[in-house]
Amino acid sequence: MSPEILHEAAEWLVRLDDQPSGRDREAFRVWLAQDSEHLEAFQRMQETLAPLQVLKQQRLASPVLRVVAVVVVVVTALALALALAL
């Protein structure tokens, strides 16, 4: 799986995390249909970031925590992409 696909999957996780628009949901469905690896990458990102769901479930509304969560998602996605590329 390419680092680019993993990066796209991470971006979709962020975009879909907080009340995505109908346009975003449709664009996501199109993206998934484009390549079977897209679903696999998205699921891998979800599994990798599952511990962060604890923050979401606790409904921590702090803007700072939301920014931290997004940064962690991006950094984790990049680290995973680099590990797979090696």
Image: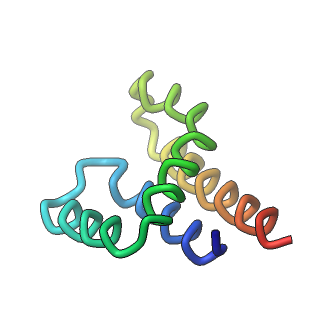
* Name of the residue lying farthest toward the right: 86
Relative depth, front residue between 65 and 33: 33
Coordinates of residue 44 in the picture (x, y in percent): 57, 49
**Quarter of the rendering containing residue 84:** bottom right
Residue shown at 64% from the left, 60% from the top: 77
Residue shown at 49% from the left, 71% from the top: 8
**Quarter of the rendering containing residue 22:** bottom left
The total of numbered circles placed on residues is 0
* Name of the residue lying farthest toward the top: 58
Relative depth, front residue between 61 and 38: 38
Residue shown at 69% from the left, 59% from the top: 75
Coordinates of residue 43 in the picture (x, y in percent): 50, 48
Compared with 2, 17 (above or below) is above
* Name of the residue lying farthest toward the front: 36
Coordinates of residue 16 in the picture (x, y in percent): 33, 54
Residue shown at 43% from the left, 57% from the top: 39
- Which image quadrant: the C terminus? bottom right
Compared with 66, 3 (above or below) is below
